[in-house]
Amino acid sequence: MAGHSHAKNVKIRKAAVDAKRSRIFTKLSRLISIAARQGGGDPKLNAKLAFAIAKAKEVSLPKDTIEKAIKKGTGEDQSESLEEIVYEGYGPNGVAIICEILTDNRNRTAGDIRKIFDVYGGNLGSTNCVAYLFQRKGQFIIEAEGQDEDTVMELALEAGADDFKRDGDYFIILCDPSNFDQVAAALAAKNIAPTQSDVARVAETQVALEGDVAKRVAKLLDALDDNDDVQNVYSNASLPEDAYAS
């Protein structure tokens, strides 16, 4: 995997998306609404909602926007009805891609996502066509600089992590989603701030790509990320940094 750091891929793509702040606000507001709809509007009793609110605060989503999103989810504000959908497909070179969607119009979103796949050399697949290649995991990506590897590994494993590994300049911690909160709390107690923490779909194996095909895959992933209805995009592609160059 030399030159194809998964952690670095995640950081590069996250930075590119975070630059589009208004789009991020829309995505996070919808995430909060869905969490509130499923588990209620009290984050103390709804771990998924607490996680969504924490993510929103990381990018300074205004408090009133968070409160409005919660009300939409609980039904107090019925101006928008959202549903969760998962789309799966293939990119150039057959790489596996999963998109997690929140939409108020299933037909519109299906057409938009299919078109993006088509334009960038991929194709939308059927349900479960690639899902088996991924596992849902709590994932923490931590910059290795300034951290003692043995200390961080011991802390993570004692807190309930399943796996700890080094990926270039980063440590990656994986855990069962049910242990996410306690691993996060253990890291926070030692003032260890992850570059990214999330409950994600983690590919069991990575496919390393180079050159033009890597750039085509990067463009497809970015185009999917740009869609307002797409919450998260996951792939088993491992790409060099220059694949994301414009």
Image: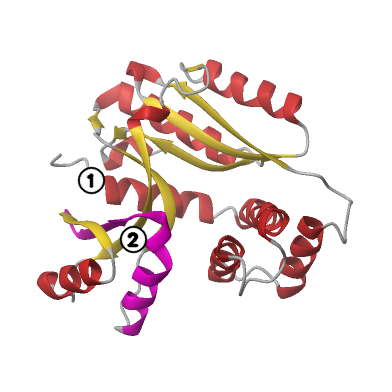
Who's the residue at 71% across and 74% down the image? 63
Q: Amino acid at mark 1?
A: Ser
Who's the residue at 38% across and 76% down the image? 185
Q: Amino acid at mark 2?
A: Phe
**In terms of depth relative to the viewer, which is nearer, 244 or 75?**
75
Residue 110 against residue 17 in the figure, above or below: above
Give the SS element for disc 1: loop
Residue 137, given in percent of the width and then of the height, sits at 37, 50
Q: Does the segment drawn in magenta span residue 6?
A: no
Residue sitting at the far left = 150
Residue behind mark 2: 140
Residue 209 against residue 170 in the figure, above or below: above
Question: Which one is in front in this view, the residue at disc 2 or the one at disc 1?
Answer: 2
Residue behind mark 1: 5
Q: Which residues are magenta?
A: 167-189
Q: Across the whole image, how many numbered discs are drawn on residues?
A: 2
